[in-house]
Image (cartoon, helix red, strand yellow):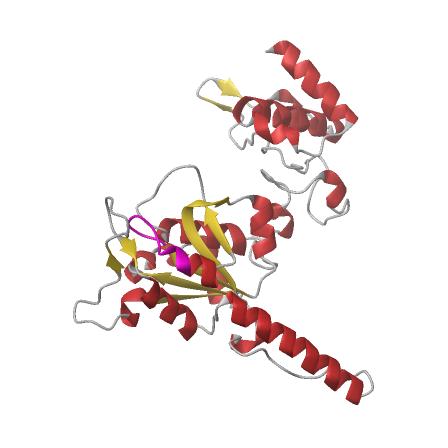
Amino acid sequence: MGMRFEIVTIFPGFFASIFENGIVRRALAEGLVEVSIHDLRAFTHDRHRTVDDRPFGGGEGMVLKAQPIAEALESLGVRAKQERAASTRTLDVDIATQAHIKDGAPGEGEAPGVVGGSRPTVILLSAQGRPLTQGLARELAQSERVVLVCGRYEGVDERINELYCDMELSIGDYVLSGGELAAAVVIDATMRLIPGVLGNEASGEFESFGAADAEIETDVEGVPRSQHGAGGLLDYPHYTRPAEFGGLKVPEVLLNGDHLQIRRWRREQQLKKTLKNRPDLLEKAALSREDEKLLEAIRQQL
């Protein structure tokens, strides 16, 4: 079974077309990824299926209630963090005991509240969360199950965050009407890093925010070494046929077949674009001495 995403939302119909196109559709069809959508209103107990209420302390807007979300999460086998921690400690003791009894053979067991033996990562999508980065997407891609709670209105009762969520996550420094768009972004950014989802496994390395050259195997079949790993930088410009369009020609260096020159040009373009659009990335980027020299030359030209 592939990686599983669970979405808790008050608008389940929002996702009807999003997962029917591109690599997401292919990943779902091939069983590399599973997505389940859960209607929050199904966990209410009043005639109007109420999921929100006025905030304590006054103020504008409404807040998503804790009870329906808690019930939705419990239905997915997600228990409160305190209970999960206690269950893990109990399981560790049980396995250690069984291993001792069976002369080192690992015991079989499963912590209560864990569905299918996989411990989910529970994420609250919120403008107050930590930013989604490529590095974090890589971490999430190692998970077996990710549960995404879509916020709405003024937000979610904070007790849900404290009791159930492993992290708050934001996709940018702006405010959306709800977490549904953010959930789709998180799923797309994460699942494309799962082995087998992309047609070319190296595509997830040779792109913006991708791995550094030192982290990429040098003999990847079908990958010309004229490419550069991003190493935390933005990607270099790409061109295809025709060689001239709108009065602009493809840079001559890309046509001469000299891979050494192409590598140098592409690295220079990565540095130039990053300096122009995201200079903050340079602080943590994996830069070589040659990169530093190129960067200094670029700064002098500006």
Q: Is residue 155 magenta?
A: yes
The N terminus sits in image quarter: bottom right
Question: Could you tell me what secondary structure mostly forms the magenta stretch?
Answer: loop
- Taking the image as drawn, is residue 293 in sight? yes
x, y percentage for residue 80? 48, 68
Task: Please state the horizontal and vertical placement of residue 82, each as a whole percent of the image.
Answer: 53, 68
Which one is nearer the viewer's eye here, 237 or 43? 43
Could you say where residue 240 lies in the image, as x and y percent from the top left?
54, 33
The answer to whether 200 is drawn above or below residue 26 in the figure is: above
The relative height of residue 294 versus residue 76 in the rendered view (above or below) is above
Image quadrant containing the C terminus: top right
- Residue drawn at x 59%, y 40% is 207
Question: 265 or 41, which is in the foreground?
Answer: 41
Stretch of the chain drawn in magenta: 151-159
How many labels sit on residues? 0
- When the figure is inspected, residue 36 is found, relative to residue 228, above or below; the finding is below
Residue extending furthest toward the left: 47
Q: Which residue is painted at 74% across and 19% down in the image?
A: 293
Where, by quadrant of the figure, is residue 275 drawn? top right
Q: Which residue is rendered at x = 27% and y = 67% of the image? A: 41
Is residue 72 located in the magenta-colored stretch of the structure? no
Report the front residue among 126 and 11. 126
Q: Is residue 273 left or right of residue 102?
A: left
* Residue 255 can be seen in this image: no
x and y percentages locating residue 290 in the rendered image: 77, 24
Res. 19 image quadrant: bottom left
